[in-house]
Image (cartoon, helix red, strand yellow):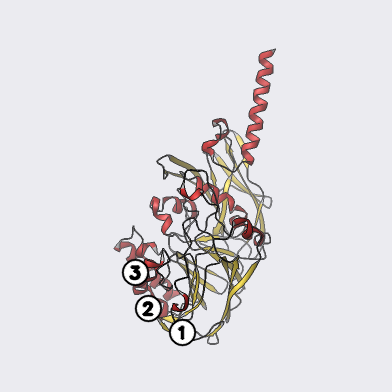
Amino acid sequence: MQKKIAIVVGVFFIGILNIFWLAYDGDVQNIPIVLHRVQKVSQVHIALGKEENSIQVMWTLKEDGKDCWIDMDGKKISNYQKDILEYLGNTGKPYKRFLYSSLLNSLEPATIYSYKISCIVSNITISSQKFSFRSPPSQNSTITAISFADFQTNYYPDPKDKYSKTKKANILPHLYQISKSLDNYDIILHAGDIAYDLWSYNGLMADHFMESIEHLSSRFPYMTVPGSHESFTNFTHYKKLFQPQNSLGLFYSFNLGYAHFIMLDSESFVGRLHTEEMIENHMKFLKEDLETNIQPWTIVISHRPIYCNPNPLCKVCTTACTQYSSILSGYLEDLLFQYNATLWISGNVHLYERSMPVYKNEIMQFGINKFENPPAPIYIVNGVAGNFDTEDDLSSVGDEKMPWNVVASESLGYGKLVVHNKTHLEWIQYAIGKTQQDSPDMIETARTRIIDEFFIIKTDN
């Protein structure tokens, strides 16, 4: 009798622990091994598919799922592809996850769909929560994007690590607010340096980051380019997590509304692993893409900038705004000018900076908040989402800013891009707090304010 009671108590205790783990969002290395086996569908994120009116849904399991499907508004979708992400993390311990993707085709434009992901793992059906997204709008529609770069979500599982000594602020609390309505944005543009870093703590940093942004990435297409921090595993984690089968690649382009987006892999040109072959492939793609583009607005997303202020107190600027920017300019700037690109949006430098229309360091049109038929691109650096490395400093720049520079700020924040129609485009930069050194608690309750806004008007379309 006592043995039976002990078994019942033991089963009950394990059940309580399993419930705890389902709600737990921490370091699995510090959790009893019995909890490691509890499974959940996690890291749900969506992206635009290759085909028009398509969405790619992606998710992660810690153990192999024998069968998965998506329930979307009463329809069961069982077509999916599976991959395994496996490598040694930064401390030499193995990381292994099972990655799944399903392509949803022939969606009605600008229509809200609800979906839930289910998988069978160890003969048990597990499911995600119910999510919703709005399908891509029709071609002749206003689109709104949120744009940022250099973004982490404050996960500190190792108290001995130098990064864990001070909790750092980021824009995550504000992303929660703006993602509550599907009417706010059509797409997310993340210009590299993701999680700081995907492979840190043997991949647990990536797990935490993706689960932290799930409220955003499950609702809006989360479009990315690789940054310098994604190269530490030769882009393995990045490629499999964000660019699985049937997707777009490390560099790609897509149309949305009146805009043509070119997602460049700047690491192919100046990254520590770049090769001549990578440069040639990228240039071939870019030339062909620009030649065939017929959209009125061309917007380039890249991690590394072409234009930013050289600054001796800015850790990254010593090379980013001199050596690397010159290399990128040499390969790309003539093409951008020739094909009348509109914007270049980047990160890498942990500041916000914005130029006037500029070509070869020459201002092509003077202005502050309004530009009409600009003959050259406007360049934006927006690496202020809250990084896990170091903040960059404007104090040594002062009045020595480059002549083409309009705004420079240290404030934490993000950008909003609105392509209203074929004649009007708008950019708004929101700042939170005074600097990136503000306390996370203060940032969480701070109000956003506009520190930069400009319009581009085209009358020659």
From what the image shows, is residue 399 above or below residue 352? below
Residue 197 coordinates in the image, percent (x, y): 46, 52
> Pointer 1: what residue?
375
- Identify the residue at horizontal 42%, vertical 39% (top origin): 93
Query: Can you tell which mark lies on residue 323?
Result: 3
Image quarter where the N terminus lies is top right
- Mark on residue 334? 2
* Amino acid type, mark 2: Asp
Helix, strand or loop at label 2? It is helix
- Quarter holding residue 348: bottom left
Whether label 2 touches label 1, CB < 8 Å: no
For mark 2, does the 10 Å Cα neighbourhood hold few (<14), some (14 to 19), or many (20 or more) residues?
Answer: some
Q: Do labels 3 and 2 touch, CB within 8 Å?
A: no
The front one of 6 and 80 is 6
Residue located farthest toward the top when viewing the structure as drawn? 1
State the SS at label 3: helix
Determine which quarter of the picture holds residue 89: top left
Query: What x and y, as percent, mark residue 314?
Result: 43, 66
Q: Nearer the viewer, mark 3 or mark 1?
A: 3
Residue 310 lies, with reference to residue 193, above or below; the image says: below
Mark 3 vs mark 1, CA separation in Å: 25 Å
Q: Is residue 139 in view?
A: no
